Amino acid sequence: IKEPIISLLSLTLPTESLYIRISRPCFLSPNRKLKISSFYSVFFHFFSQHFSALAMASNNGDVKLIGAWASPYVMRPRIALNVKSVEYEFLQEQFGSKSELLLKSNPVHKKIPVLLHNGKPICESSIIVEYIDEVWSSGPSILPSDPYDRAVARFWAAYLDEKWFPNVRAAPMAATEEAKNAAVEQLKEGLALLEGAYGEKDFFGGEKIGFIDIAFGSMLAWLRALQVMLGGVKLLDEEKTPGLCKWAAKFSADPAVKDVLPETEKIIEFAKLLVAKIKAAAASS
Amino acid sequence: MAKEIKLLGTWASPFSHRIELALKLKGLQFEYLEEDLSNKSQLLLQSNPVHRKIPVLIHKGNPISESLVIMEYIDETWQHQNPLLPKDPYARAVARFWAKFIDEKVLWTAFKAYNDKGKEQEDAIEEFSQQLKFLEGELKGKEYFGGERFGFVDIAAFFILQFLRVLQEVKEAELMTEEKYPVLFEWMEKLQGNEVVAGCLPPREKHIAYVRARRAAAEEAASKTKAA
C-alpha cells in the first residue's frame, strides 16, 4: 500500500526533502537515507491511512448491516465482522417500524439482521456469521477447521436458537408465575448443558472466540438483564456454572465484543419498552 | 467399512430420509438402525442426550445430531462425490437459508394448516400458501433448487414436502395442489423419478396408514385432555 503513495509523493515533492527508494522495502540499509520533513510525514501518514482504508474497503467490497443495537441476533454478525476487522456501515432500524430496505432485502422473514455485501442480502444471523467466516477466510477463523468440531459448533448454535433463546423471551412475558418458573427452569437446564460443553480453554472456540461463543455470547446482555428483571434470579451462578461465569467475563472483554455488547441497564430500559409494546399489541388484537 | 458409519433413524421420518439419501449420494456404506421411538435405544439416548431424537449419525463412534448439521458434516467429510452445497459462499448462504426456512417455518405452519381448527387454522393456511409461493419462486427457472443438479435444499425440501402430501391425504385437504404450485410439483415428480431418491421414500400406502394412525391417536389424546 505504501509504495504507490511514495511514488506519488516523489513526483510532487522537491527531491531534496525525500530520499526513498521505492524498490526497497520499508527497512532501509544504512547507506540509504530516509528523510521526510515533519509536514510531509503528517501528510504522508494521513494519505497512507486514507489509501489503506480505501484499499481495504475496495478489497472487502461494500459491507452494510441492517440491524438494531439491542438485538442479540444482530450482535452476532457485528462481532464476526469485528473478528475479521471488516469495516461496515451499520444501518439501524427505527424501533417499531421496518425500513423499505429491510423489507426488500428480507421479504421472507422481514427481520434483522441482514448483511448486504456488494448489494446482495444474506439473512439469518448464524448463516450470516458462516458467510462472514467463509468470505473473509484470511482473518481469524470463527468456525473450527475439523468437520466434527464444526458439527458440534453448529449443533450448539441450533440448540440455542431453537430451545434456549425462546425461554429468554418467554420468561419476562410470562402470564403466570408458573409459566415464568417453567421458563427459568428451562434456561437453567440449558446453562447446565453449556457448562458441560465448556472446556478447559478460555472460550468455547479455544484460545480465541469462535462460533459458539458468538452464538451464545450475543445473548449475554439480555441474560444479565433478565436476572435483574426477574428479581435477582441467578442464571449465571458462581456455584452451578463457574465456567460460564469465567467465560462471560472474558467474552465481554474481548476486543471484538466489548463495543457491541450493550450495558445491562440499557437493555433493561429497552426490554421494558418492548414488553409494553408487545402487551399493547396483544390487548388490541 | 459399514461399521464406521451408523445411522439411527425411523422409516417414516423425513429427517431420517434426508440422511439416508445424503449417505447414498456420497456412495457410502452404512449400518442403518431402526429406532422404536416409544422405546428408545441406549445408543440413541447416549448419542443424543440433549434432544433424544433421530436422525443421529455415528461416525467412528462420534455422534452427530440435527439433520441439517449432519448433512453439512457428510458434505465436509466426504467432499469428492456429489457435493451437496455449492462452493460459492453466497450460494451456500442462500442454500442454508432455504433449508432453515423449511425446517423452522414451513413444516410447523403446515402442521397448523392441516391439523388446527378455526381462526388459527385459517391464518396458518394463508401463511403456508405464502411459504409455498416463496419456494415456488425460488425454484422457478431452475432444474432444482441446487441449479443443474439437486443438492442441499432439494434434499431438505423433498422429503418434508412428500411427508406433507401424505398428511394432506390423511386430512383430505387440498392445500398443496399441482394447479397452485406447478413448479414445485414438476420438481417433486422429477425427484420421484430418480431411483436413488425414490429408494429413500417409504411405501406410500404404508406411510399414509401410519400417519393416519398417529393423527387419530393424537386427536384422541387431545380430546381426552379437553374433557378432563
Image (tube, coloured by chain):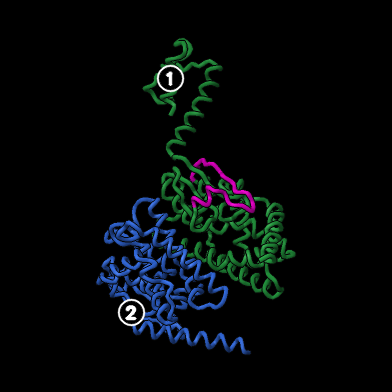
Chain containing mark 1: A
Q: Nearer the viewer, residue A269 or B31?
A: A269
Kindly identify the residue that appears in the image at 38 percent across and 71 percent down: B177
* Viewer can see residue A150: no
Q: Is residue B25 magenta?
A: no
Q: Is residue A49 above or below residue B208?
A: above
Q: Looking at the rendering, in which quadrant would you find the C terminus of chain A?
A: bottom right
Give SS at disc 1: helix
Kindly identify the residue that appears in the image at 44 percent across and 40 percent down: A61
How dense is the environment of label 2, judged by Cα within 10 Å: few (below 14), some, or many (20 and up)?
Answer: some
Q: Is residue B144 above or below residue A1?
A: below
Q: Which chain is green?
A: A
Tags 1 and 2 on a common chain: no
In three-dimensional space, the C-alpha distance between marks 1 and 2, rounded to whole angstroms, equals 71 Å
Residue A127 is situated, as x and y percent measured from the top left of the image, at 46, 56
Magenta region? A84-105
Q: Looking at the rendering, in which quadrant would you find the N terminus of chain A?
A: top left
Give SS at disc 2: loop
Kindly identify the residue that appears in the image at 61 percent across and 52 percent down: A97
* Viewer can see residue A274: yes
Q: Nearer the viewer, residue A210 or B171?
A: B171
Q: Which chain is blue?
A: B
Say the numbered circle drawn on residue A8.
1
Chain containing mark 2: B
A31 to the left or right of A83:
left
Q: Is residue B204 above or below residue A133?
A: below
Say the numbered circle drawn on residue B202.
2
B54 to the left or right of B201:
right
Residue A245 is situated, as x and y percent measured from the top left of the image, at 63, 59
Residue B86 is situated, as x and y percent measured from the top left of the image, at 34, 55
